[in-house]
Amino acid sequence: MNGFFHPLISPSVVATQMNQQNKTLVWDYWQQMNGRPHANIVSKALTPDTVWHGFQPLRHLYGEDEIWARFWRPLLQAIPDLVRRPYIFLGGHFEGGDWVCGTGDFIGTFARDWALGDVAIPAGGSSVHFRFGEFCRVENGKIVEIRIIVDLPDLMRQAGINLLPPSYGRDRWIPGPLAGDGVLLAEQEPAESEKSLHLVEAMIFGGLNKYDGKDQASQGLELYWHPHMVWHGPVGIGSAYGLDEFKQNAQGPIVRAFPDRRGVGHQARVGDGRFAASTGWPSLAGTHLNKYMDWEPTGKRIGWNIMDFWKRDGGKLLGNWVMIDLIGAALESKIDLLAKLRRTIRHEFTNDT
């Protein structure tokens, strides 16, 4: 539009058109990386100044070259036939930024060790599937910011290394939305998008954040969640089916361990049709006052990097797919899971020799 606004086109129409263009850009980039991935594909979609915020131990990368050299190339050397399979994909505008995001699985053959900084995840030689969540901020037809979390503990578990105790909930290959309707390549009705976003905001700021430190009933979760909702978290937390399991296995352990925790710091919060998503760095902050998993309380303030993807059914939330950098979260509570990984590898190597 060359910087000029056509008087006959409403701002909402312009925003919808931009959202569709941005979704096409990111979707095409993801699909091209599923074929014969190489640095030129990354260079075409990103910029020399693109900022990449990731997961422990890859926390921050800068520019297309470093993103290729330190994330994509080692990952593709480890899993040469890697395919990204999103089951939720949406976009929207938040506080001056245009975002496209998605979650799903990375699938492939774990043929070689994956070098991540000064640690390597040992390959099992067989097929693996591990979840990702990614948010991309787009400006002028390029991806200028990426926030990504992958479920590393699950990948390690499939390689035979358990860094976390058994999950509070159920561990399984997490499905996408039951109706298979989470990949929103088509234009969505703006009114539906607003309903989804408003419901999520009401649930976070009027529900989760209203925990009184004593009784989960103070959150009033029934106002926001469908009684047959599903909640899918990372390995270590697991999945919950129905509101009762959600309270017991997902919310219960967190609110007991971090009674003053709050949803904070969203860099992006968008709605698209009947879906919504948010991420924050951190997205949850609180004081570690009681045991969580096998992490002893520190009495210190912590912050967790989290991504949430929701599906709305009428006036209630029916599904929630959650990504958490649990290795980074553990480090906030003085638990170094990567040191545990190194000790495990040394022990196995010593026993083998």
Image: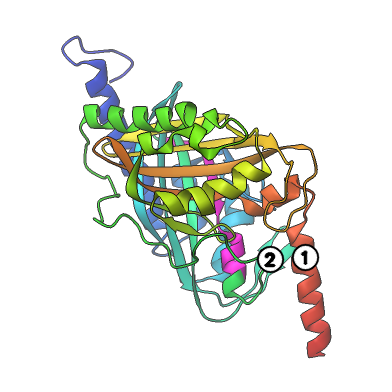
Tell me where the magenta segment starts and ends, as one range: 142-156
Residue displayed at 84% across by 84% down: 350
Q: In this image, 339 relative to 182: left or right?
A: right
Q: In this image, 111 relative to 309: left or right?
A: right
Residue displayed at 46% across by 61% down: 37
Q: Residues within 10 Å of mark 1 (few under 14, many from 20)?
A: some
Residue 184 is a magenta residue: no
Q: Residues within 10 Å of mark 2 (few under 14, many from 20)?
A: many
Distance from the alpha carbon under mark 1 to that under mark 2: 7 Å
Main SS, magenta residues: strand
Q: Secondary structure at mark 1?
A: helix
Which of 205/246 is in front? 246
Q: In this image, 28 relative to 205: left or right?
A: left
Looking at the image, the residue that sits furthest to the top is 7
The amino acid sitting under disc 2 is: Leu
Mark identifier at residue 80: none
Q: Quadrant of the N terminus?
A: top left
Residue occupied by mark 1: 340
Residue displayed at 27% across by 39% down: 274
The amino acid sitting under disc 1 is: Lys
Mark identifier at residue 163: 2
